[in-house]
Amino acid sequence: RRLPSQMSIHDLPHYNPSLSDSRGIQVPVLSKVELWKQEKLKKLRKFQTQAREFLYFLVLWGKTIQKIGGNFGGGVKSYFLFLRFLVVLNFLSFLLIAGFVIIPSLVFRQVGTSFMNSTGEVLVKSKICTIYEPNPPGLVVFYNFFLDLLSGTGFMEYSFMFYGYYNNTMVGNSSFSYKIPLAYLFTAFRLTPSFLTGRSHSMGSAARVAVATGGSTVVNYSMIVFNGWNFGCLGETATKLKQKNLLYRLQVDLEEESLKKRAASLTLLKKFGLHSLRLLMALLVLGLNIAAFYGIYYATTYSQEQQNKRVNKESDGVQDLFFEYLPSIVISVANFLVPLLCDQIAKVEHYSPSITVIVALLRAVVLRFVGLGVLLFTLWNQITCTGNMDDAKCKECSYNYASYACWETRVGQEMYKLTLFDLLINIAVLVLVEFPRRMVVDNWSSKVSQMVGRQEFVVSSNVLGLVYSQTVVWTGALFCPLLPLINTVKFVILFYCKKITLFSNCRPPQKTFRSTTSAFFFLVVLLLGWMLASVVMIYSIAVIHPSRGCGPFRFSDNMWSIIPTSFYNLSAATQEFLFFIGSQAFTIPLFSLSGLVMCYVIALFSIYGKSVGLLRLHIGHELTRFFSIFPFLL
Amino acid sequence: MGTTASQLDKGMLSEYQELTFLTKQEILLAYKRFSELLPKEETNGLSYRIPMNAILELPELKTNPFNKRICMVFSTSDSHDGSLSFDDFLDLLSAFSDSATLEIKSHYAFRIFDFDDDGTLGRQDLEKLVNCLTGGTVDTSLTPEEMKQLIDNILEESDIDKDGTVNLSEFQHVISRSPDFVSSFKIVL
């Protein structure tokens, strides 16, 4: 009989093979040593998978996310993975700030003035610029506490929460020196290395997958059909769901292909008509967006005027609160209405399904980011009198002192309000819309409720919401150091809220959301948000004059100037080294080298892609040749 | 494990271990589950053939759209009725186990998808395969035009020698490019 193999058990002596010939697969004969090696390999592989599973459950929310992925698919799971990543990012940012800015400030305040010396002369054009009174005298009514909490004024304004509380403390003696302003500025730059290192790795691997599989534009039907079924799928509902998913995926791909063929075969006149229709719709969408931006602009201007008008800086009740939150309300309404209208417009445009999705996402991204940009631009207008230093209001203090005694705190308050309102809206929608919808659909069966049905978890708009909140936090972190902590808490609450609504109110997705390309997309959008925040931060640090009455930079002309000043306090050798790094002799070779490396990597990228295609063709030719020589093997 | 383990002695257990990809625990578990499907009066589990409709009661196979094909492929009965003996059952679990290689899995996958058992996947086989994947009923299947378009695309992509059918090597070529075939072609008791 055949020596022991790992193929068929029908070589056992007690078994009587009857049809074994038809199924015999020739396998190489294995010796005892090789058999032992294979056993060990098996055991090692099993151990590896078990260890990986164990570690997976130790990670934050690992079990929950796995459960979500199993029930709702890869798209929804990628949203929760992204949310978890943002929670960790915010928490780490907060730890950095706490360690380098908040705790030293706390310590030095307690220690007292004997160790502190504020360097820098007070070059004040007029004494009036340095007056800053965040705590108005007078009785504080009980409900004011709540209103102050919501709007960041009153007791919250002059606290660790906002920029205005920190002092220009520079502690120094022979062995140890610590400058609060420097620490403040450096923690503001903390995001750059962490973001770049963390995300460039995953973006790189996503790009690698795209090259190896020959790009995502080529739909491989054989792969879907031959590889589509998961034999471990248990249970009737799971099976039916998987079948629906496969059906939808095949239908979408086939429809796209036939649309492409149809589009290619259109007459010239029809093409012209279609393109002009699309242009018209694009202009309409642009008009809608501009209307939304004007709305945000006016809301912000009006809200700022109302806040500046308040007598004695005391809250006057709920109406004032409404005015304070007016920009947030307008932004949320715009972010809700405009995509809805764009969806209706997209039905007229007749793009193929995948392009429709991409176009909708792009429009939503543009709306959110430019809306935020408009709000920041409006604030800048008010603070710096539209950049005109000779304007009456800005002449004395180089910023609009009359309205903004401490403008950084005010910007921080706006960002704080945006964050808070976002969280409140999410919870309100959860309670007031999603739960009632589920109750109506479940308990009241009628045609309308059947048509509406239980809601589906829309991944893309939720992810955009996350990116928007994170951009707000990045923009505001310079002015409100505790904002990352608040955002961490907010995202944790959001995680549990979304999880509850997912499991209680949502049905599993009928339509699959392609998760590999979407992960790349999320990271690109996050990068865009980070760039917007960086632009704001760099502008505030380098150009706008810091408030003279508050904050760690009150004695400088701009926030950046602390770095050159402290630079000259370093030892001579360090100074020379840093000068050398910044000089042309070093940077030009560095840039040319990195340019070379980049060109090389890009060339490799394209060559690998091309060789994948070439190899495929080659295999085809080889097999045809082989079977033409040995036709009896077919 | 009591009386069931006594029917499977150590010698046979180690032989089964050598000849399949299963571990000792998996073989014992398989024997336990197999014995549960035996009728009460049958004492020698190793030589009895369990009929197909009893095997299909197993929860791992019950809702699988390919369950009948799986039984037919692994059955070695003379009457081609899909009944499985214990050896067939172990063969099945071995091919679907964690440690089975890609070649073995793709070989058996090909035989499962070959509905008419002619050694190649023709248009009929592909059509039946797609219907199994999507549900097969009237409102969960593709229209005839979509089906034709899909099968044309599949044949264009994978039929390298252009004979109108997909043979084993072409099938294995498609499968080898997918990284998660091994993990999705898995049944664990």
Image: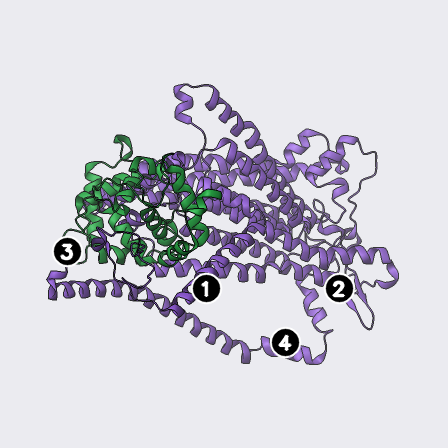
Chain colours: A purple, B green
Q: Is residue B23 above or below residue A32?
A: above
**Of residues A558 and A114, the one drawn nearer to the viewer in this rendering:** A114
Query: Is A222 located above or below residue A438 in the figure?
Result: below
Q: Quick check: do tags 1 and 3 share a chain?
A: no
Q: Marks 2/3: CA distance?
A: 76 Å
**Mark 2 to mark 1: distance in Å?**
59 Å
| First in sequence: mark 2 vs mark 4 | 2
Residue for badge 4: A578
Query: What kind of element bears circle 1?
Result: helix
Q: Residue at x 45, y 29 (%)?
A: A454
Query: How much space separates mark 1 and mark 3, taking CA atoms?
Result: 43 Å
Q: Nearer the viewer, residue A582 or B173?
A: B173
Q: Residues within 10 Å of mark 1 (few under 14, many from 20)?
A: few
Q: Amino acid at mark 4?
A: Leu
Residue bearing the label numbered 2: A179
Tell me residue B102's x, y (percent): 33, 57
Task: Give the Cα distance between marks 2 and 4.
Answer: 20 Å
Q: Closest to the observer: A588 or A307?
A: A588
**Contact? badges 2 and 4 (CB < 8 Å):** no
Instruction: Return the residue at label 1.
Output: A40
Q: Is residue A10 left or right of A453 when viewed as pictured? A: left
- Mark 2 and mark 1 residues within 8 Å of each other at the beta carbon: no
Labelled disc at residue B162: 3
| Residue placed most toward the observer, B173 or A109 | B173
